[in-house]
């Protein structure tokens, strides 16, 4: 038995519901997916032992591994896969993540036999296999899903190497080994049951407490060493550090184009020019997190460094653009005004330190100070979780909002900024806008399997987004683990950066 100390607690253990990172990190331990992604970006078998794709890209036929059972005894078969896709795409499941990956493309899932299932698409979607490798698409027991969302949130049932015993809210999730496990992915380090008896998945949102738990032996591995302790951790011979830069969209401040202020592209560009984002990130994160000025993180396939910093820190340009936009007067505090109105923007953020860690709050405060130099007032508005959920879907509630999207494919640009996402109305298109040229470019990219064509189109999409100034990218999301040296063979999978503990073992004397 080991203890893993996480920084955040999921709101629901079922990653089909909602879909955020605290869910997927723990779900990777008890759910298996149809396929897995390797460190080199290849998709390899998992619960699906093989697949064929029709020439038109609209039909995927999967052959399923036989003899697999969910930990409640229900057989894993084609009917179970069909039931999972039904739940994922049912609006009542409130699957904001899974729905955005599939809703624009998915037609139906059909059981061809007990161990063969067909997925039909409405239009070609070349990132499908990569998307399905994520724990968000982990296969769950149909019997467990039938209990309803509330019960399934408490104790989802998978075929994975561990199973959920109990969720002690605000404290931990207790996981025990699935002794019958025999469905490891092709890129696992061993087949068969996990070596560990179980895992205590503990919630320690305070950075200092979490790092201290590792030193005291209370935890065997932890998520995210505090930036201020990075140098000390590197010198500590009793632990090893692992890090992974997520593919997808970096942490950014999205600019709401329905805001009376940011509807003007000149003001959006001025805002980005006025913030020395690179300095803010380097200062707040002590160099541990790099600055990223592209709408894609550098770990994303087809990332184009040319778009890394298209609107660099330039207060002269910012002032010129604000003058052109008519914000030419100043009030007694030095903030710009137009027609008697102050140039003021609202930036709500989650007051929970696990959701907005101290370094992120420092970044927001630094941006606030930088914008004041050119006459823009940034109002930082601390909110609780419930209030933030309401804010995200309301274009009247904010001018700026922090956001990121971890994703193994550059198709994340379509998820974040398309008309399809805007029409879903779940608040994930936080700039509240879209562009036909961008949508068409990304749809053409997802419709082709030619790598050269995909690269050209995805890089063109990055250029379109850079010109729109809908977002001010800041830094790439990372998984950073500190692991006791007595715990061996912990590794980080690449689709979403989750720690994988099914291959881990305690060394002699541990």
Image (cartoon, rainbow, N blue to C red):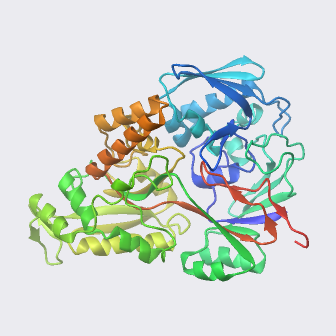
Between 354 and 125, the one nearer to me in the picture: 125
The relative height of residue 203 versus residue 163 in the rendered view (above or below) is: below
Q: In the image, what residue occupies the spot 48% across and 77% down?
A: 286
Expressed as whole percent of the image width and height from the top left, the position of residue 324 reads: 10, 59
Expressed as whole percent of the image width and height from the top left, the position of residue 200 reads: 78, 62
Image-quadrant location for residue 361: bottom left
Q: In the image, what residue occupies the spot 73% across and 24% down?
A: 78
Where does the N terminus fall, quadrant-wise?
bottom right
> Is residue 43 left or right of 379 when viewed as pictured?
right
- The answer to whether one can see residue 15 in this image is no
Between 32 and 208, the one nearer to me in the picture: 32
Q: In the image, what residue occupies the spot 85% across and 58% down?
A: 196
Image-quadrant location for residue 464: top left
> Is residue 194 left or right of 445 when viewed as pictured?
right
The relative height of residue 124 versus residue 423 in the rendered view (above or below) is: above
Q: In the image, what residue occupies the spot 46% across and 55% down?
A: 297
Expressed as whole percent of the image width and height from the top left, the position of residue 40 reads: 61, 48
Where does the C terminus fall, quadrant-wise?
bottom right
Residue at the outermost front position:
452
Expressed as whole percent of the image width and height from the top left, the position of residue 385 reads: 51, 58
């Amino acid at each position: 038995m080991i203890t893993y100390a996480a920084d955040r607690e999921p709101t629901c253990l079922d990653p089909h519901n909602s879909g955020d990172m605290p869910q997927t990190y723990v779900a990777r331990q008890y759910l298996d997916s149809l396929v897995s992604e390797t460190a080199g970006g290849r998709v390899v078998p998992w619960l699906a032992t093989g697949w064929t794709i029709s020439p038109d890209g609209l039909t995927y036929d999967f052959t399923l591994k036989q003899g697999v059972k969910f930990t409640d005894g229900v057989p894993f078969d084609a009917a179970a896969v069909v039931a999972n896709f039904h739940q994922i795409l049912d609006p009542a499941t409130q699957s904001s993540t899974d729905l955005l990956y599939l809703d624009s493309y998915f037609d139906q899932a059909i059981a061809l036999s007990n161990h063969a299932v067909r997925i039909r698409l409405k239009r070609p979607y070349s990132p499908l296999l990569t998307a399905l490798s994520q724990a968000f698409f982990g296969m769950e027991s149909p019997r467990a899903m039938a209990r309803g969302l509330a019960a399934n949130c408490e104790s989802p049932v998978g075929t994975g190497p561990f199973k959920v015993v109990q969720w002690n809210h605000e404290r931990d999730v207790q996981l025990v080994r699935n002794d019958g496990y025999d469905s490891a992915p092709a890129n696992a380090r061993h087949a068969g049951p996990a070596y560990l008896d179980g895992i205590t998945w503990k919630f320690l949102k305070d950075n200092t407490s979490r790092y201290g738990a590792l030193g005291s032996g209370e935890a065997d591995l932890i998520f995210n060493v505090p930036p201020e302790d990075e140098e000390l951790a590197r010198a500590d011979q009793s632990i090893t550090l692992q890090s992974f830069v997520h593919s997808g969209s970096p942490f950014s401040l999205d600019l709401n184009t329905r805001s009376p202020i940011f509807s003007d592209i000149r003001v959006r560009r001025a805002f980005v020019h006025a913030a020395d984002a690179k300095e803010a990130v380097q200062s707040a994160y002590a160099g541990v997190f790099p600055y990223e000025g592209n709408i894609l993180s550098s770990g994303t396939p087809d990332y184009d460094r040319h778009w890394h910093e298209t609107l660099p820190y330039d207060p002269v340009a910012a002032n010129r653009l604000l003058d052109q936009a008519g914000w030419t007067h100043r009030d007694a505090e030095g903030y710009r005004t137009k027609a008697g109105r102050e140039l003021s923007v609202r930036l709500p953020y989650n007051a929970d330190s696990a959701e907005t860690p101290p370094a992120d709050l420092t970044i927001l405060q630094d941006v606030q100070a930088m914008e004041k130099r050119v006459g823009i007032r940034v109002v930082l508005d601390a909110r609780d979780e419930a209030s933030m959920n309401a804010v995200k879907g309301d274009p009247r509630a904010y001018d700026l909002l922090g956001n990121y999207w971890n994703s193994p494919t550059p198709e994340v640009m379509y998820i974040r900024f398309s008309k399809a996402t805007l029409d879903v109305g779940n608040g994930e298109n936080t700039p509240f806008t879209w562009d036909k040229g961008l949508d068409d470019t990304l749809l053409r990219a997802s419709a082709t399997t030619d790598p050269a064509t995909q690269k050209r189109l995805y890089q063109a999409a990055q250029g379109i987004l850079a010109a729109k100034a809908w977002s001010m990218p800041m830094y790439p999301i990372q998984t950073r683990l500190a692991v006791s040296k007595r715990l061996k063979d912990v590794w980080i999978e690449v689709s979403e950066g989750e720690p994988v503990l099914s291959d881990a073992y305690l060394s002699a004397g541990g």
